[in-house]
Amino acid sequence: MVGEDAFPEKQKRLESWCDDLWSQARGQPGDVKIPNRLRKPWPPLLGRLYEPAAKPTNNRAERSLRPAVIARKLSCGNKTERGRDCWQILTSFAATYHQKPLDFIDYLEARLPLAPQGR
């Protein structure tokens, strides 16, 4: 475990090491692909350096999506592309409102037009 006073120094050393790694000359095409693939996800991978409260995994997000994925599979909500897209959007909103915690049904009710009554 790194002490709080040593953390900024180690953070700068790691950033410097990464900069050196990215700037090294590459001799073969395969040598260029690997750093390029790592460079894109690098900021999220190092996000914990800049936000100590951030969790080092995405387990919470994955677990919050799991019930929606199971429900989609059981309800056949993915038979068409339109059904899949609709399901993904609605479950994403519902999960967000559940985490806040706000009432998703109230949100939808205020924004969706009511079906015409009495045909």
Image (tube, rainbow, N blue to C red):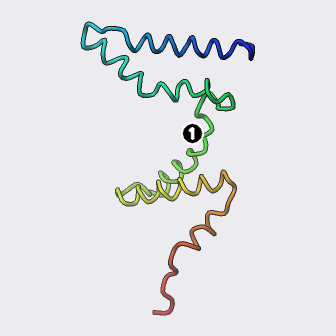
Q: Is residue 12 left or right of residue 76?
A: right
Under circle 1, the secondary element is helix
| Residue 7, horizontal then vertical, whole percent | 68, 15
Rendering quarter of residue 49: top right
Crowding near the residue tagged with mark 1, few <14, some 14–19, many ≥20 C-alpha atoms within 10 Å = few
Q: Name the residue under label 1.
A: 62
Q: Is residue 14 left or right of residue 40?
A: right
Considering every residue shown, the one lying at the far bottom of the view is 119
Q: Kindly identify the residue that appears in the image at 53 percent across and 48 percent down.
A: 70
23 vs 70: above or below: above
User: Quadrant location of the N terminus?
Assistant: top right
Q: What residue type is labelled 1?
A: Glu
Q: Kindly identify the residue that appears in the image at 41 percent across and 56 percent down.
A: 85
58 vs 104: above or below: above
> Is residue 1 in view?
no
Q: In this view, does 41 lie to the left or right of 109?
A: left
Q: Is residue 87 left or right of residue 64?
A: left
Q: Kindly identify the residue that appears in the image at 44 percent across and 57 percent down.
A: 77
| Residue 52, horizontal then vertical, whole percent | 67, 28
| Residue 99, horizontal then vertical, whole percent | 66, 51
Q: Kindly identify the residue that appears in the image at 36 percent across and 60 percent down.
A: 82
> Is residue 36 in view?
yes
User: Quadrant location of the C terminus?
Assistant: bottom left
93 vs 27: above or below: below
Q: Nearer the viewer, residue 84 or 36?
A: 36
Q: Nearer the viewer, residue 64 or 55?
A: 55
Q: Nearer the viewer, residue 62 or 14?
A: 14
| Residue 41, horizontal then vertical, whole percent | 45, 28
